Image (cartoon, helix red, strand yellow):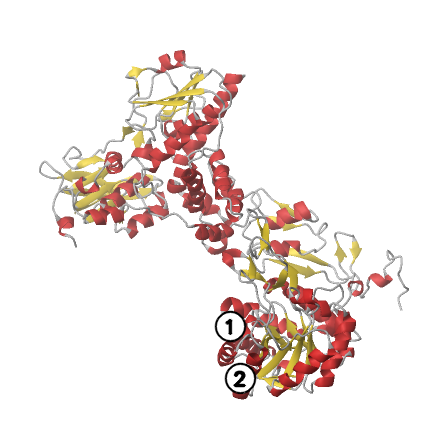
Amino acid sequence: MAQGQIAPGIVSGRLSSDELTSNFTDLHPPLAPHEAAVAADRCYFCYDAPCVTACPTDIDIPLFMRQIQAGQPEAAGETILAQNILGGMCARVCPTETLCEEVCVRETAEGSPVEIGRLQRYATDSVMVGGSHPFQRAAPTGKTVAVIGAGPAGLACAHRLAMFGHDVVIHESRPKPGGLNEYGIAAYKSTNDFAQAEVAWLMKIGGISIETGSVLGEGVSLDGLVENYDAVFLSIGLAGVNALRAQGADLDGVRHAVDFISDVRQASDLSHLPVGRNVVVIGGGMTAVDAAVKSKLLGAEHVTIAYRRGRDAMGASRYEQDLASSHGVKIMTNVQPVAVHGNGAAAEVELEYTSSHDGQLSGTGEMIRIPADQVLKAIGQNLDGAPEGLNLDGNKIAVSGAGRTSMGGVWAGGDCAAGGEDLTVTAVAEGRDAAMDIHATLVS
Amino acid sequence: MADLTTNFLGISSPNPYWLASAPPTDKEYNVRRAFEAGWGGVVWKTLGSEGPPVVNVNGPRYGAIYGADRRLLGLNNIELITDRPLEVNLEEMARVKADYPDRALIASIMVPCEEEAWKAILPRVEETGADGIELNFGCPHGMSERGMGAAVGQVPEYIEMVTRWCKKYYDRPVIVKLTPNITDVRKPAEAAKNGGADAVSLINTINSITSVDLDTFSPEPSIDGKGSHGGYCGPAVKPIALSMVSEIARAEATHGLPISGIGGVTTWRDAAEFISLGCGNVQVCTAAMTYGFKIIDELTAGLSKWMDEKGYTNVSEVVGRAVPNVTDWQYLNLNYVAKAKIDQDECIKCGRCYAACEDTSHQAISMSDDRVFEVMDDECVACNLCVDVCPVDGCISMVPITAGEVDPRTGLEVQRDYANWTTHPNNPMAKAAE
C-alpha cells in the first residue's frame, strides 16, 4: 500500500500522478469500429421496441443500431441527437441498466443486453468528432426566450427553440455552462472536458447566447424576465442541500458530497485535491456512489457508504452499487448517523442500526462507531432559492402539460420541476418538450 | 465408433472428406500437410496442358460476403487453374501418392476440347498413380472464355464427348465436375453418364460479383478499377448445391450415379446432409480456406458421433437416405395442416414474428399491450416465416393438426388421406384420383 493512503486526516497526494491519471480515465473506453459493428449486430430490431419505450427521450434505438450496422455511424448519431441533443452525455451517464438496457430482449434472453449506451456514444462521438452540426436553424422569428440555468434541461430547451428560429438567452449562475454535466457527474464517466465540448457543439446551431454569473434573485428577477422576454424557461436545478441532523455535523471534515464532487470535476490537478484516509458517505443515491468511488480513486484507504434503509431502497442502481463495491467501497445498509465525534475535526461516525416496520424506520438502539476523518453528506438536494409566486408540488415547481408553471409565460423543467426522475436524460426530455410547447404558444 | 472409411468408385479413403480442387491442393507442401491433418483425400488443383502455364491476376483473387462479426458466408474467386508447370505438378502428385497410399488422390484436369489434348495428358496422369481423375467442366471464369471449364459444362454434348475420350484413354475412375451455371443440372449429369463417367461431382462455383465499390464503382474483387465475375462458394451456396445434388440423385436417368457432393460444406452436419441426399462423399474447400486444415477434426468427430447416436456403422448406410423424400411440389400432401405455436416461456418478446407476419405475411399473430404474441389459428397458414425470423431457437414450432379436427382457418375438417395438387378440384389439369 502506498504510504500516502494511510496518512492520517484529509490530505492530498495520496496517490502518484500516474495512478490518479489511470484511475480517472474513461470507465468504459469507446468502442472501436469493429467492436461497434459486432455489438450493434446483436440488436434484434424489435417491433415497437421496449428500449425506445424505456428511454425518456424516445430515441429510436433499433434504427440507430441498424444505421451502425449499415456502416453509417454519423447517421446513427443524427437519429439520436434529433431526439436528445445531449445524447453524447447521456450515452456516458444514463443509468442504462435501469432504462433501455434493462428491458432489452437480449437481457431477457441471455442476461446480456445490447450495449446501447456504449453504442450511442460511438454514434454521437462520430458526429462530434467530425465537428459538423447536423441541425439547421429556421428563419428568425423575432421572438426571444430566457432560459434560466445552462444544465441539461436548459440546454435542450434552448437548442430546440433556436432550431425553430427563436433567439435564446441563457442565464447561468456558475462560471461555466453544463449544470450537473459539468459540476456533478462522476469524473470517470465524462472525461476530456466532454461537458464543455458538448455545449460548444450544441451552440453551433446559432441564436443562443449564454450569460454566466447571472443569478436569479440577484439582479435578475422572474418578473423582470417575464416582462423582457416572450417566454421564460426555468431550469434552475436543486441548489439547496439537505442538512444532516446529527450531533457534530458542524465539525471540520463534514461536507456536502455535491461540493466534493464539484471540486473533483473542477480540479486542474487531482494530486492537489485532499481526501480523507477514512471516508464515510451518508446516503444511498447516485451522488453517494459517485462521491464514494471518487474518494477511493483519490486514494482514501477506507471508504464506507452508510445508508439508512436496505439495498433495494437505494437510489443507486444495483449496477452502481456493484461499481462501488468493485472499487473497494464498503456498503453498510440499515444504519443511520447519530453523531460525528471528534475534537474540532471529525474522527468517528456513530451509526445506529435501523429496522423498518410498515415503511416506518426506527433505530434499534444498537450503535456502531467507525473511523471517519471525512464525512460526505449525500442525503438529497432541495429547491432552495426558487423565485416567489410559483405554485409548488411538494418541494418542486408544479408543472402541467409540457412544463407549464402556474405563472403565464413561464415554463420549468429538469430537477427543479415536479415529476420524472432526476436524471440527465429526463431533464433533456423535459427541456425539449417545453420548447415545443413554448414554440407552439409563441407562433399561435 | 462409426467407421468413416469410404469406398467411392473403388477408391478407399479413411473418411469421406476430400479437399476440393482449389488453392488448398495446389502443391505438394499443402497436400502433405492436409494428409497429416487427417483429410481423407484431395482433388489436386486443376492441371492444364503441357507448355507455358496460365498466369493469374496480380491483384485480389477473392471477394467475400460476411455475416455478423465478419463470419465469412460466401467467397468468390477469379483464380485460374494451376499456374505451375504440368511436370512439376505430376512429379509432386506421384511423390505424395507414394507416401500416402491410404489416401485418395484425384487429378483434376482441364485441357482444350480436342481429343489430342486429352490423349496427351491422360497417360501422364496415370503414371503418377493417382486414384482417378476429375474433369473440370465447371470453372466459370477465365478458362471458360477460352472454351474450357464451364464453357464445356454448359453443353451436354461436349461433356459426353470429352468423357468418352477420357474413358478411352484412361483406365481409372472418371469423375465429371458439373457447373451450376446452367438451367437444368440433370442434362449435363445425364450426358456425363452417357459418356461413361463413373461419377459426377457438384457444384462448381456460381457466377458472382460480391459487391461494388461505391467510390470507384468497380465490382469486387477489383483489379485496377475493373472487375470480372468470379465463382461463388462457401456456406451461402449450400442450399443450391443440395438441390442440384438431389435432382441428379432422384432423376430416372441418373439415379444411382455416384455423386461427390461439393458446395459450402462447413461442418459435419452439412456433410451428413449431402450424403443423405445421395453423395458417396463430400469435397470441402471454403471452410478449409477460412479456418485451415484443422477443421477436419470436427468434421470427422462430428459425423462419427452423429452416426453412433443414430446407430449407423458405415457411411454407406447413410448415402441417399433422404432421396426418397425429395419430390415435386405437386405431390406434396395438401391435407397436411399445421399451425404455428409460440412457447410463451421461451418468448423474449422482441416482436419480430409479429412484424414479419403483420407486414409481410398473413396477419396471423396478435400483440397485446404487454407484448404477449399469440398465433391466431383462424388466420395462420403455417408459412413458417415466424419460425425463420424468431431469434430464439425452438420458441416457435409448427404443430400439425390431427386428422379429424377442424382447421379454424378454413372451417373444414382435416382429412386423414393424402391428397395432392394433381387431383385437386382447383387444378384445371387435375386427373381423377386413381
Identify the residue at image location x=64%, y=56%: B341
B383 or A375: which is nearer to us?
B383
Q: CA distance from mark 2 to mark 1?
A: 21 Å
Q: Residue A136 location, x and y as percent? A: 49, 28
Q: Residue A351 location, x and y as percent? A: 20, 43
A40 or A440: which is nearer to us?
A40
Q: Name the quadrant of the C terminus of chain B.
A: bottom right
Pick out the residue farthest to the left.
A343
The residue that mark 2 highlights is B96
Above-or-below relation of B323 to A187: below
Identify the residue at image location x=86%, y=62%: B423
Q: Nearer the viewer, mark 2 or mark 1?
A: 2
Quadrant in which residue B57 is drawn:
bottom right
- Disc 1: CA contacts within 10 A as few (<14), some (14-19) or many (>=20): some
**What chain is tagged by disc 1?**
B
Disc 2 marks a residue whose amino acid type is Val
The residue that mark 1 highlights is B295
Q: Name the quadrant of the N terminus of chain B.
A: bottom right
Residue A402, visible in the rendered structure: no
**What chain is tagged by disc 2?**
B
Pick out the residue farthest to the right.
B432
